Amino acid sequence: MEKIIQEKYVQLENVNMTFVTRKGTFEALRGIDLNIREGEFVSVIGHSGCGKSTVLNLIAGLLQPTSGLLFCAGREIDGPGPERAVVFQNHSLLPWLTCNENVYLAVERVFGKNENKAQLRARTKAALDLVGLGHAADKRPNEISGGMKQRVGIARALAMEPKVLLLDEPFGALDALTRAHLQDELMSIMAKSGCTAVMVTHDVDEAVLLSDRIVMMTNGPAATIGEILPVALPRPRKRLELAENAEYNHLRSEVLKFLYERHAKKAA
Amino acid sequence: MSVISLQRKNLETDMNHETSAATQPAKAAPAAVTTVAEVPAKATNSAISDRAAKNRQLISAFFQWLLPPLFGLMLFTAIWALISYQSEGLPGPIPTWHAAVELFSDPFYNNGPNDMGIGWNILNSLERVGLGFGMAAVLGIPLGFIIGRFAFASRMAAPIIGMLRPVSPLAWLPIGLLVFKAADPAAIWVIFISAIWPMIINTAVGVSKVPEDYMNVARVLKLSEWKIATRILFPFVLPYMMTGVRLSIGVAWLVIVAAEMLTGGIGIGFWVWDEWNNLNVEHIIIAIFVVGIVGLLLEQMLIMIARRFSYE
């Protein structure tokens, strides 16, 4: 039993999602089947509008599937909860709270019942130190850069010690250099925490660099999983070494072929 | 000696005096030192001229800020003077000014309830506005939160608010007189009922505009309703709420004059009516200015408070 849960830590079984809008119904996802191992890093990649964020929101519990089942650690997902922490695309920090207070809000919610204030503060500080933002703890989100905001978002999510970390295009809004820097940081943080992660992205390099498996989605409507590509590159991975690595470049071109040959999106 | 030569002599001594004054420091100090000393002297000179330029800029900015409203007021006073010159009963700016000086020289005299200073009248009106507005805030802001937060409450309240909001405030006065059987609570009731709508509506609009992202954070963290209210809704809604409060206090101050005219008692509204009965038109004009200026001060005070609480 234990073993099955480890193998199917996050489980999606024949998940369908249809949105009812004013203009009628829109079938976003059809027949999604996916199993994620404990400690695995899975990327979901696809063209915009393919419903990859919907998959993430379903796992987060922010959306309820029209039909199908979702499990996390052997229990059915019936709503959002701190054991499935989300790093939002636009950081979603509360602008009236300092970085410290933003993280503390999450820490207090998860550990407040069993720990005293000093312990909660220590957890908050540790989380901010982990993302290298100890010095900016007392700044408000509008006083720090976009990359720093996203790091606080990651700190907030990790401070909850989630079973699964869900990342919704976490670096999409950042410039290329900051993005590369944060990707490296995320890799080392994930190696330390051993946390299971699902990341939605549209960046091929990011997917290959960070993932153990890449889930490639077909175009919507009624999008589904096209292919799943295992990434067997050894860890720790180094960005510069990989640039010359034949396996890396092969995987990269596999994803590109999927996206631009087999499932090319017509120009919008 | 002629007068001219005398004058020239004076001139020469003056000139000598000047040159000696100019050369004195140079003589006192060795030549090498003076050249070095010139540099900081120049620097302070330029600093002084910088400061002077900055001062000039400040002064010109100040005048640019001050002049347009000043011209506006002057134009207003001129038109008023012109109209009062043409019309028989309307006092001009100058007699009004004299009456105002007399009135405000003793604002807090008390010759019984029918003859009290202007200060007492203003304070009594402010007290009524404060009570009516305060009760409206205590009830209206939480109501706004509930209406904004829960779709059911919003749909429930929509027809009531939609129907009652456009009713003229004074239409509520007879109901107040009937229920409270006294003039003063009835006036406060009118203030209450006219001030409550902007606060309910603006608060509710604010709550309904809370970004989905923040609510998603709350959902992922499974925050309690209390934490959602204090950590997310309240800080976000505060600017909307302050707009509601400002509109409300504006309405309350608008309505007080009319309400007091009808209910009587001590207050700026009844004072206007009283002065009309005495045909003391200067005082009516003064009352108009007083009402306007007090309203302006209330508004400015609330803008300052709103800025204090802004998180940006």
Image (tube, coloured by chain):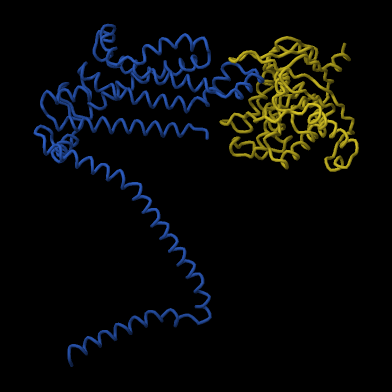
Instruction: Output the letter for the chain in blue.
Output: B
Q: Quadrant of residue A28?
A: top right
Q: How many marks?
A: 0
Q: Position of residue B84 (x, y in %)?
A: 13, 37
Observer-nearest residue: B84 or A141?
A: B84
Q: Position of residue B4 (x, y in %)?
A: 20, 88
Residue A191 visible: no
> Which residue ends up furthest to the bottom in the rendered image?
B1
The colour chain A appears in is yellow
B132 shown above or below A126? above
Q: Position of residue A5 (x, y in %)?
A: 84, 14
Observer-nearest residue: A89 or B45?
A: A89
Q: Position of residue B32 (x, y in %)?
A: 53, 80
Rendered-image quadrant of the N terminus of chain B: bottom left
> Which residue ends up furthest to the front in the rendered image?
A266
Residue B19 visible: yes
| Residue A51 shown left or right of residue B277 in the figure | right
Q: Quadrant of residue B126?
A: top left
Q: Residue at 86% x, 40% y: name it.
A: A242
Q: Residue at 52% x, 33% y: name it.
A: B311
B126 shown above or below A182? above
| Residue B61 shown left or right of residue B7 in the figure | right
Q: Residue at 53% x, 16% y: name it.
A: B149
| Residue B78 shown left or right of residue A52 in the figure | left
Q: Residue at 25% x, 85% y: name it.
A: B10
